[in-house]
Image (spheres, rainbow, N blue to C red):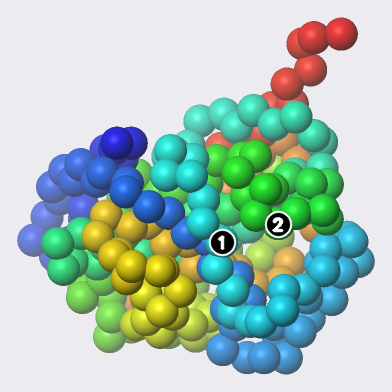
């Protein structure tokens, strides 16, 4: 079983967490504001991606397709990341990270679920106990940046009040999983529309989840490399 070696950072200090990934899912169209959801759907349509039959929606992703940074090797230039909070469920506890659902946008136009298997999900090495940020959840700030050439472009910016709550997200996942087993599950939350409504491919991607009350933040970043060394 694929294991994520993480650090839990809480009010009592830090500790290591070996998290065995039994299952992973990516949620989509998860906005509390349905007008924002519609804008994201229109953004996808511009790129040839059709909306699902129902929203929100859920996609299974192979459990080994999650990592904590480094280099993502891709086969198409048309790939991009998106900022998401990450929920990890283990023995009745919820841990919160931040990450990116990096996706092959060219393949996504034909099959979203297949596109989800082409690139790893990336998440922070550090996570928070959910109970310690629950009271300020809606005020947490999430941002992403695309690194393109010498430019670092602000790509997404939102407060978590824009996305389904952790409780609603977990409940939705439980309803959709056939046997209801969420132990050792990694849930990527789904995202919000890009600033300006345009998807941008780049050589790197960064995501931050920040608590404005404490100034503390979680982050992940990675480089994107096209596999082009064979003629």
> Does 1 sit left or right of 201 as displayed?
left
Q: Could you tell whether 102 is left or right of 218 in the image?
A: right
Q: Looking at the image, which residue is at 43% across and 54% down? A: 24
Res. 104 image quadrant: top right
Where's residue 130, x and y in %? 26, 71
Residue at the spot of label 1: 59
SS for dot 1: strand
Residue 65 lies, in percent from the top left, at 49, 40
Identify the residue at horizontal 77%, vertical 73% (top origin).
Answer: 51
- Which quadrant would residue 74 be assigned to in this image? top right
**Residue 200 appears in view:** no
Quadrant in which the C terminus appears = top right
Label 2: state its secondary structure: helix
Classify 10 Å Cα crowding around label 2: few (below 14), some (14-19), many (20 and above).
some
Q: CA distance from mark 1 to mark 2?
A: 8 Å
Residue 117 placement (x, y as % from top left): 60, 44
At 46% from the left and 74% from the top, the residue drawn is: 176
In x, y percent, where is residue 149? 79, 35
Residue toward you, 30 or 173: 173
Furthest residue in direction front, as rendered = 178
* Position of residue 8 in the picture relative to residue 177 (left or right): left
The answer to whether the residues at label 1 and label 2 have Cβ atoms under 8 Å apart is: yes
- Name the one closer to the observer, 39 or 168: 168
Outermost residue, left side: 12
In the depicted structure, whether residue 73 falls above or below residue 167? above
| Label 2 sits on residue | 112
């Amino acid at each position: 079983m694929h294991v994520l070696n993480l650090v839990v950072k809480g009010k009592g200090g830090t500790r290591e967490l070996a998290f065995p990934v039994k299952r992973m899912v990516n949620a989509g169209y998860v906005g509390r504001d349905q007008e924002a959801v519609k804008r994201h759907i229109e953004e996808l349509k511009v790129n040839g991606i059709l909306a699902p039959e129902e929203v929100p929606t859920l996609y299974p992703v192979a459990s080994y397709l999650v990592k904590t940074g480094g280099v993502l090797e891709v086969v198409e230039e048309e790939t991009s990341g998106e900022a998401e909070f990450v929920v990890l469920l283990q023995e009745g506890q919820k841990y919160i990270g931040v990450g990116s659902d990096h996706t092959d946008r060219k393949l996504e136009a034909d099959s979203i679920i297949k596109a989800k298997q082409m690139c790893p999900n990336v998440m922070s090495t550090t996570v928070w106990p959910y109970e310690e940020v629950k009271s300020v959840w809606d005020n947490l700030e999430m941002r992403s940046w695309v690194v393109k050439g010498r430019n670092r472009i602000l790509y997404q910016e939102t407060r978590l009040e824009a996305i389904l709550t952790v409780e609603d997200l977990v409940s939705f996942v439980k309803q959709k999983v056939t046997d209801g087993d969420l132990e050792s599950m990694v849930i990527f939350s789904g995202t919000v529309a890009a600033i300006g409504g345009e998807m941008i491919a780049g050589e790197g991607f960064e995501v931050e989840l920040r608590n404005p009350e404490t100034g503390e933040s979680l982050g992940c970043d990675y480089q994107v490399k096209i596999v082009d060394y064979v003629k």
